[in-house]
Image: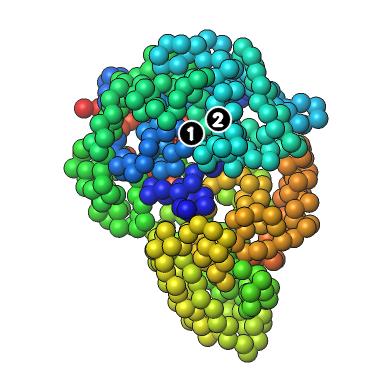
Amino acid sequence: MSAPLTLSRAGGIAAAAAACALVLSACGSPSPSTPSTGSSAAASAADDGTYNLGLITPTGDIDPLTTTQVDTMFAVGLASAQLIIASPSGKLEPQLATSWTPSADKLSWTVTLRSGLKFSNGKPLTAADVVSTFDKILAPNSQSPAQSSFAGIVKSVTGSGTTVVFRLDEPYSDFPYLLTGANTWILPAGFKDTNWINDPVGAGQFILEKYTPGQGITYKKNPYYWDASAVKLAGIDATFYSDSQSELLAFQSGQIDQFSPEGDAQAAQAALGTSYRQQRAGYAKFDAIVFNVTKPPLNDVAVRQAVAWALNRHAIVQTVYGGEATVGNDVATFPDYAIQPQGLTARSADLTKVRQLLGNRVVSFTITTYTDEQTYAQLIQQQLDATGRFSVKLDVLPEAAYYANGSDSPWLTAPVTITDWADRLPAQLYSLIYAAGSSWNASHYANTQLGTLDNEYEAATTTAQRQTLANQIAAIEWTDVPVIIAAFEENDVYLGSAVHGDFPNGEDFSGGFDFRGITVSS
């Protein structure tokens, strides 16, 4: 299998919910943001400009329900639409839906669609299409990564006309954010999604006109899009590239209008000089150092805490992420989630604390990971060994071997591992990383109190209640430290000088791959 929640351009399961903010019981229909028109130069830019986009060549099927590659999601998302999208700051915004309201008992959410919606073929989009799409996602034999986002949460989906009702197994205040997740694009009822690329019907900002395997995709503006007047581009030409380096060269030469750095952002910036402007697009993932708490010496909480206090997190941000990351504090809450834990001491490299926790012991263990995490693993090894209190070895495997199928897979059983996890809601991350019954709980950690608090958090409806519970949850994660989260990697996009305007909701699935207000000058 691939990485459990990776959102890398190379692949991995990306059934991720958006970076999240608070959803109160009275949640209704926020007004859509007004896309920026950018500088005065944008006003003179031709409204019929064509945006040149670079994508990594897909290695699998381009199927809206099952695709996992970020670039393939981009290819789908340009021609598709979700019920709700989220801004990089975590604000929910209407897309195909205009409102989302919980019932009094919090066991259902009613979503109201816009009236007069149409697919790109001109046919009406109604509640029946939404129900059909989610029936496919939730089906027992579903191959959609999105199924894991809704499993144990959504009991059924019904609807008629412009009203859709999601019935839940238990109260879940953050439910609307699940609707912004990957693979939740609305498809026509009865449509064979596996044939989508040959008949790409969607409700997005663009219509997929031509797909040439190994070469690229051509899009034109969708006149049936619900906010078509805000889409200024005449179309998008997407060219496939074999790797990021080829894409970087194309950006340097002006063949494409944007570039998303992967890996060493500082090297990319040095290569580009000043011939670009940078836009933040939210957060991509964190790389978790996971301790198997059932195996010595990691079953000793003092050892785990000592590792956490030994790390120079700012050096990790600079060396591993090229400065494009935010320091983490071992709590699974992304920095753009509205409710941030309070009251915790920020961990930083502190040799005095390490010595207090370990005494005269020298602790030995091996970190097992895969090739994409090798730079991170080597830096951790160097930092820990430099304290004189650790002796660390590395076992770097091919990705396929690290994520081998079965319960004895190295990423699930090795004493210490490094695994990347994409942006999800805190409650989702709890259920996957910390919950005792989770098949992806590589730490084998369990804390009954943490589970109880998480359930109370999702049932709570006021800001004060949720803040108090978030603080208590974070305190347990920080103290028990079954997982170290040293940094949150940022999503940044470099734009060429021909691009005018700011992307209103970033450039990912949670923001709807939103090009409203963007123009390109010749």
Residue plotted at (52% across, 52% down): 4
Q: Nearer the viewer, residue 279 or 244?
A: 244
Q: Is residue 450 left or right of residue 399?
A: right
Q: What residue sits 66% from the left and 57% below the top?
A: 434
The type of residue carrying mark 2 is: Lys
SS for tag 1?
loop
Q: Please, is residue 428 above or below residue 84 in the view?
A: below
Q: Nearer the viewer, residue 430 or 502?
A: 430
Total marks shown come to: 2
Residue tagged by mark 2? Answer: 136
Q: Picture coordinates of residue 348 (x, y %)?
A: 57, 69
Q: Give the structural element (helix, strand or loop) at label 2.
A: helix
What colour-coding does the image apply? rainbow
What is the C-alpha distance between the residues marked 2 and 1? 8 Å
Q: Earlier in the sequence, mark 2 or mark 1?
A: 1
Q: Which mark is residue 65?
A: 1
Q: Residues within 10 Å of mark 2 (few under 14, many from 20)?
A: some
Q: Relative to 341, is 196 above or below?
A: above
Q: Left or right: where does residue 244 sit relative to residue 422?
A: left
* Residue 336 appears in the picture as rendered: no
Q: Position of residue 511 (x, y in %)?
A: 49, 34
Q: Residue 91 occupies which quadrant of the picture? A: top right
Which mark identifies residue 311?
Answer: none
For the question of whether residue 154 can be seen, the reply is: yes
Residue name at image x 68 percent, y 63 percent? 445
Observer-nearest residue: 445 or 54?
Answer: 445
